[in-house]
Image (cartoon, rainbow, N blue to C red):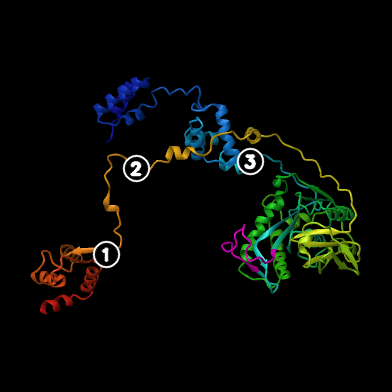
């Protein structure tokens, strides 16, 4: 219903300055006189009525105290309880709060279950001053790629191999990546395993001068940066880097964003894997050749952060800063030879005409009588490395000092992180978590009083062999199928009488079969009539 300008002015004049019950009484009277809804009266007078004052305790929950609320948040932050579940637990322990109210409070304090699973800590962006000043390195499993029995690289669908299942138990490919922090040039390699030798092989590939002129990246960095991986913390890795003059630094635990450049590179390389999974590589070498072609394309395109091509930025390196070791020295430090050897019952392996004693502990004692992979540096016969279950162990080595990692500058923590850390440090409340469900909901469920039972929604089950039906039921089914007329003709009555032959009831299955026959062959009814 349209409203005139005169009525709008009248509403504004009468409702001017009114609030509360007075405004409600006048609005109801005007609505009745003008034939309008009360909400429209309020709408047209919204500009002339004073706004409602906000509650003095706005934003402060009234149903629970702050101490009770912190106990609730312990279950959410530490144990990931959902709001409906926690509301039931709280109710059984004398704390009453609606799930929607609790979720709203969590969102206001930025402690919702979704935000608890995100890393919302602030961070500083940083970058090396020049190319080859700092390289980042990390590794990840190359999705569903594996090495087949014939040496080719296969792909196993994630529907067949879930991440927590072993799959076909064939060797999985590991993707190891090296990134120059200043230019963002990426160099990567597919390897079998995530052990010391695989990392050294990747660094040898990244730091040597490439035969391909389209990939100009090479040379040693001043610093090699990574997480606290067991490989980079090993004595032999540290010793090799010392000989090369490379300082090893690691970031703190749970600070993966500190090496975000290499982490983002894995997301990009996973896109490469999605494309190439359609084509089956004939060998690991062919897979790495395809990966190098892809990296040439990637390093030649404009980077979103720097606005420059990674290769273009790296080529501005000062020749005086381009550190390169002699090829023989780099080969000796980073390249290893591989073979297989049997572990004898007295826990030794034969290499170079002498026995290398293995430690008398796990996992070596579990591999007696089996062959394991053994590698060593060329021209060095005093040390070997035994690889068991994707881990490498150095045999007959001398201890060296491990240099400490660099310092880390902390930034100020926001309030939600402080509150989260406070709640994580609290002890779990001694609340009653079970038992009250049966007390509250354990009774047999019954429909509400006064509700009629709806039989129309019951699906009629298939008749059992013992079900019998009368002639009236049979005629009604034939009429529903439009085989018999309404009312029934004389010849149709005669057909039914002959079929039942004096019987009051017949098996339902026989009658249904007879209906199907008549529907398919209507002439059967006429033949019986003639008969």
Circle 3 sits in a helix, a strand or a loop, which is it?
Answer: loop
Given this view, does label 2 or label 1 mark the residue nearer the observer? 1
Q: Is residue 100 visible?
A: yes
Range drawn in magenta: 154-172
Which label's residue is closer to the chain start, 2 or 1? 2
- Decide if residue 349 is on the left or right side of residue 528: right
Residue 156: percent from left, percent from top: 61, 66
Residue 33: percent from left, percent from top: 24, 26
Given this view, does label 3 or label 2 mark the residue nearer the observer? 2
Which residue occupies the extreme left position in the image?
490
Given this view, does label 1 or label 3 mark the residue nearer the observer? 1
Vertical side of 66 occupied by 450: above or below: below
Near mark 1 (Cα within 10 A), the count class, few <14, some 14-19 or many ≥20, is few
Residue at label 3? 120
Residue at label 1? 466
- Decide if residue 365 is on the left or right side of residue 239: left
Residue 517 versus residue 23: which sits nearer the camera? 517
Residue 34: percent from left, percent from top: 25, 28
Magenta portion: prevailing SS class: loop
Q: Quadrant of residue 504?
A: bottom left
Q: Does residue 331 show up magenta in the picture?
A: no
Which label's residue is closer to the chain start, 1 or 3? 3
**Residues at marks 2 and 1 touching, judged by CB atoms closer than 8 Å:** no
Residue 480 versus residue 56: which sits nearer the camera? 480
Label 2 to label 1: alpha-carbon separation? 32 Å
Residue at label 2? 446
Label 3 to label 2: alpha-carbon separation? 48 Å
Circle 1 sits in a helix, a strand or a loop, which is it?
Answer: loop
**Residues at marks 3 and 2 touching, judged by CB atoms closer than 8 Å:** no
């Amino acid at each position: 219903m349209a409203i005139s300008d005169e009525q709008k002015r009248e509403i504004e004049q009468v409702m001017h300055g009114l609030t509360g019950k007075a405004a409600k009484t006048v609005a109801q009277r005007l609505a009745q006189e003008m034939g309008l809804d009360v909400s429209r009266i309020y709408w047209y007078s919204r500009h002339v009525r004073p706004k409602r004052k906000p509650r003095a305790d706005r934003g402060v929950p009234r149903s629970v105290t702050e101490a009770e609320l912190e106990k609730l948040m312990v279950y959410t932050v530490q144990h990931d309880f959902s709001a409906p579940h926690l509301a039931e637990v709280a109710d059984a322990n004398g704390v009453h709060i609606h799930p929607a109210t609790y979720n709203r409070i969590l969102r206001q304090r930025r402690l919702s279950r979704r935000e608890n699973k995100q890393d919302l800590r602030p961070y500083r962006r940083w970058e090396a001053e020049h190319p080859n000043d700092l390289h980042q390195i990390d590794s990840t499993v190359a999705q569903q790629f594996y090495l087949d029995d014939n040496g080719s690289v296969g792909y196993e669908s994630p529907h067949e191999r879930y991440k927590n299942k072993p799959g076909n138990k064939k060797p999985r490919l590991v993707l190891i990546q090296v990134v120059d922090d200043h230019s963002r040039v990426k160099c990567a390699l597919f390897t079998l395993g995530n052990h010391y030798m695989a990392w050294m092989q990747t660094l040898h590939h990244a730091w040597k001068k490439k035969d391909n002129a389209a990939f100009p990246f090479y040379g040693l960095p001043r610093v090699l940066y990574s997480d606290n991986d067991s490989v980079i913390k090993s004595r032999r890795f540290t010793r090799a880097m010392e000989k090369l003059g490379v300082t090893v630094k690691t970031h703190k635990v749970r600070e993966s964003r500190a090496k975000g450049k290499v982490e983002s590179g894995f997301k990009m390389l996973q896109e490469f894997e999605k494309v190439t999974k359609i084509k089956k590589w004939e060998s690991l070498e062919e897979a790495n050749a395809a990966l190098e072609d892809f990296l040439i394309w990637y390093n030649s395109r404009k980077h979103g952060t720097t606005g420059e091509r990674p290769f273009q930025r790296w080529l501005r390196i000062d020749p005086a800063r381009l550190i390169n070791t002699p090829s023989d020295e780099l080969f000796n430090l980073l390249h290893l030879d591989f073979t297989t050897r049997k572990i004898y019952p007295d826990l030794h392996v034969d290499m170079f005409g002498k026995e290398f004693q293995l430690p008398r502990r796990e996992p070596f004692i579990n591999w007696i009588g089996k062959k394991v992979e053994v590698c060593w540096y060329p021209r060095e016969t005093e040390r070997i490395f035994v690889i068991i279950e994707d881990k490498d162990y150095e045999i007959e080595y001398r201890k060296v000092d491990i240099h400490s990692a660099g310092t880390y500058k902390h930034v100020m923590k926001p309030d939600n992180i402080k509150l989260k850390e406070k709640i994580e440090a609290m002890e779990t409340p001694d609340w009653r978590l079970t038992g009250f469900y049966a007390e509250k909901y354990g009774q047999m469920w019954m429909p509400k009083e006064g509700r009629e039972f709806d039989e129309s929604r019951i699906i009629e089950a298939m008749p059992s062999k013992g079900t019998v039906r009368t002639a009236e039921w049979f005629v009604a089914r034939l009429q529903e199928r439009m085989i018999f007329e309404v009312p029934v003709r004389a010849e149709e009555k005669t057909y039914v009488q002959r079929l039942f032959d004096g019987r009051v009831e017949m098996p339902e299955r026989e009658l249904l079969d007879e209906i199907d026959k008549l529907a398919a062959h209507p002439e059967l009814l006429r033949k019986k009539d003639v008969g």
